[in-house]
Image (cartoon, coloured by chain):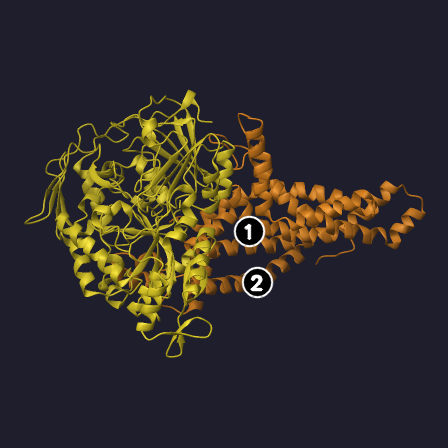
Amino acid sequence: MLTYIARRILYSIPVLIVVSFVTFWGLRLAFDPLQKYRGQHNSASILPVQRHRLGLDKPIYVQWFKWFTKAIRGNLGVSDRTNNAVWGDLIHHLGTTIHLVVWGTLISALIAIGVGVYSAVRQYSIGDYTFTGLSYLGIAMPPFWFGLMAIVLLVTFPKTHWNLSQPIFYSIGLHSSGQSGIFNLDYVRHLALPVATLVVQSVAAWSRFERAAMLDVLGADYVRTARAKGLPRRRVIFKHAFRNALIPLVTVMALDTAALFGGLIITEQIFAIPGMGRYFLQSLNAGDAPALLGWVLLTAIILITANLLADIFYGVLDPRIRLG
Amino acid sequence: MTSKRKLSLRVVAGMAVLAMTAAACGSSSSGGKSTTSGGAGTPSTAAAVVPTGGILTIGAEQEPDCFDWVGSCGGSSWGYWMANVATMPTAMTPAKQADGTYKYEPSPLLDGAPTFVATPTETVTYKISPKAVWSDGVAVTCDDFAYTWDQIAHGKDIYDPTGYNDIAKVDCTNEASPVVTYKTPYSGWQSLFGSGYGIMPSHLLKGKDRDAAMKNGYTWSGGPWFASWTKGDNITLTPNPKYWGDKPKLTKVIFKFEADTAAEFQAFKSGQVQLIYPQPQLDVIDAMGAGIPNANTLASAKTGAVEALWIQNTHFPFQSLAVRQALAYAIDRDAIVKQLFGKVGVNSAVNSLNPYVLTDFSDQQAFSKYKLDLAKVTSLMTGDGWAKGSDGIWAKAGKKASFELKTTQGNKRRQLTAEALQQELKGAGFDLKLNFRTAADLFGKDGPAGNFDIALYAQQVTSIVPGLCAQFCTKNIPSSANSNTGQNWQHYSSKTADTQLQIVDNSLDPSAQAAAAKSADDILAADVASLPLDPLPDIVIWSKKLVGPVGDHAILGAFWNANEWGCTGGSCT
């Protein structure tokens, strides 16, 4: 197992190198690192100095190599927008996104697996048709629309219609002013709607995967054999079928969850959550190349790591899969 | 803009420091109209007794990038409105007059008006109020003026040192009376040590890295409030007990960041925020037109912004004066403005490239002759050798009158404006193509490179210093002579306009400045150097539980006098 992990980590290095170079090259084409100096009164003297300092007078691969060697030592440079270290800014925003991703993934996984198993076991029942219809609805609803509708129906309407002193749920940020922590009602009231926005999309897609995987497994010979041996239905489903049906879902969940770390851009924008998505958007609008480079690199690392974790988890779920 | 209008605002170096609002930061003024509904407008509540106590939460459309106001990261107008105005003392302040215009007046920091001497050397002598102290009780002194000047004029990575680099010295022989001597005349002296930057405490910052000490927030204040910044979530103002002017009545003012206008509006309706200062987007204007329960609303056209069609004067077909004039006669600007902002009472286009706040230094009717007149379009175009083809589009020497309009993407109001223009121009025989660009591309690449035919965006003044030389003088066309930093992206060039605009920039005589500015406006209008469109109204919506002189300030934003506000019954929620 350790050999396998080491080999996968080694394989991921060229991927990161290619990703970082392509991104670096693209951002150099798209954004001018000297833009912030161009409007200054003494720009004529500043520009050559800054061009040299930033290495812009060197070929692109030399610039990239200089950046990359610093990046792997944790120095992602300084944000053009905030004047702060990019690494510090990224960690701050990543910490906020984790709130959404952890709760969203956990709740989505529980619901999606439950719905998927139920739909497969009760195939073509009213419940199955209902969940299928709701899944298609969930997939069809864009997050910006669902988010705004959730705010209108669950925040504004109850507050104004029933003349409440406070809204039932909040739609701005993760905490009220002066509040902090995650074990309090204020946090739940803030997190409920953004997590719901995320959950609706994830459950809709994941439950379909789980249903299909479960149907495949339920039709397999070994399940038929287990039934023929007279094992209780519950044991056949949960001990013999369910575990194997998780394997395809794990891949999808791992990659989807990793992508969420990169940014729930729309959800974070609507609910004013200062996570990775909003950081990306603000950096993009400002043409902040160092921040965008750091964001891409961190997101790529998270994706590669998630992929690796999914592969390792295969071995846990299915002992026939040998890693190494 | 941005970006409040977070504003993403970029200050243009020059006498009239103008800012481009990428996301349309908000304000503007056309025709100088201002409408208030719901009762608690500026004057009516101002006279009422304002209770003390209470917490007010305000929706903020932009989070600032940093609190180092003089640094290159400090250009956010929302940051300025929320925290700079609340904490930084200033020498002169743009004061709103009864007619909605603005004039510089001494702020509470000064003990009377400064003494200004124009000749032989421009010299300004300030007298600091003996009551003026920082939040730690240390008096505000001449050292603070000298430190501020030194940082801005000689510091690295400064946002805009215009004016400060014209100062020769700040004489602190008398600590209570700084004497500022200029090495080159600077007509905008009243804006220095004032709006935008303010004055920094020398005793707390001298010898330190100013940017590092301020960029993530600071714990001192020289204004009515302290400002604490919880990144990503809010800026909270709490009263500064050492402030020598009118002390705040509210216990706390919280600015919650919410960049999405639609979500911000819902947050207001659900009571999570009690005041919003949104961009004049269509959904907000529609909602105001329909009426918002339990809320007061204000739409002011007396602002510091002008949204215009900025024309690249050297691009085909606009190198021809006749074509530029024909374009101006081909558009019903009043109809477009009425369609966009009619529901909040703004029904007519602006007729100057200078905003309303600079009324005294502009001809606000310069472009008024340009009304929709297709007969004049035909006359001008045929007189210039154009003829309509079978497709109804003007053509000359085998080239069609086809050009492109670039504007910021993701802005429904601008999209509607562009589509309306396209429709109108098609009827007049012009083929307009639309190109929606990111703010970074439009303002970072296309503009400086002159790579546009027509660009639709707003410019907003951050001070009431007159002058359009930065945008229209020949010397400011981007070129190697100015290291391609010139802001005359229109590439407009006129010797007569140059002469007048430079008088505006350089004269220390306000009456000569005013005359030259009006003359320059008329020349720009005659040449159709660009075409002003709308005033980008300022909009404020606030809960009826909030009382006090709530209103808009075209330069300082909507919260400049929050220290005079209160909550009915001690609670604004």
- Residue A266 placed where, x, y %? 54, 48
Give the alpha-carbon distance from disc 2 to disc 1, as whole Å: 17 Å
Q: Amino acid at mark 1?
A: Gly
Q: Which residue is mark 1?
A: A262
Instruction: Point out the image quarter for the N terminus of chain A.
Output: bottom right
Mark 1 chain: A
- Say which residue appears at 37% left-offset and 55% top-offset: B333
Q: Is residue B529 above or below residue B271?
A: below
- Residue A298 placed where, x, y %? 52, 53
The reply to whether residue B480 is in sight is yes
Q: Amino acid at mark 2?
A: Val
Residue A20 as seen in the image, left or right of residue B527: right
- Which residue reaches farthest front? B375
Q: Colour of chain A?
A: orange
Query: Which sits earlier in the primary sequence, circle 2 or circle 1?
Result: 2
Which circle marks residue A15 in the picture?
Answer: 2
Q: How many marks?
A: 2
Report the chain shown in yellow.
Answer: B
Q: Mark 2 vs mark 1: give the one in front.
A: 1
- Residue B57 placed where, x, y %? 44, 32
- Residue A219 placed where, x, y %? 86, 53
Q: Depth check: give the residue in front, A14 or B72.
A: B72
Instruction: Point out the image quarter for the C terminus of chain A.
Output: bottom right
- Say which residue appears at 48% left-offset and 44% top-offset: B283
Residue B447 as seen in the image, left or right of residue A90: left
Q: Secondary structure at mark 2?
A: helix
Q: Is residue B571 above or below residue B363?
A: above
Q: Secondary structure at mark 1?
A: helix
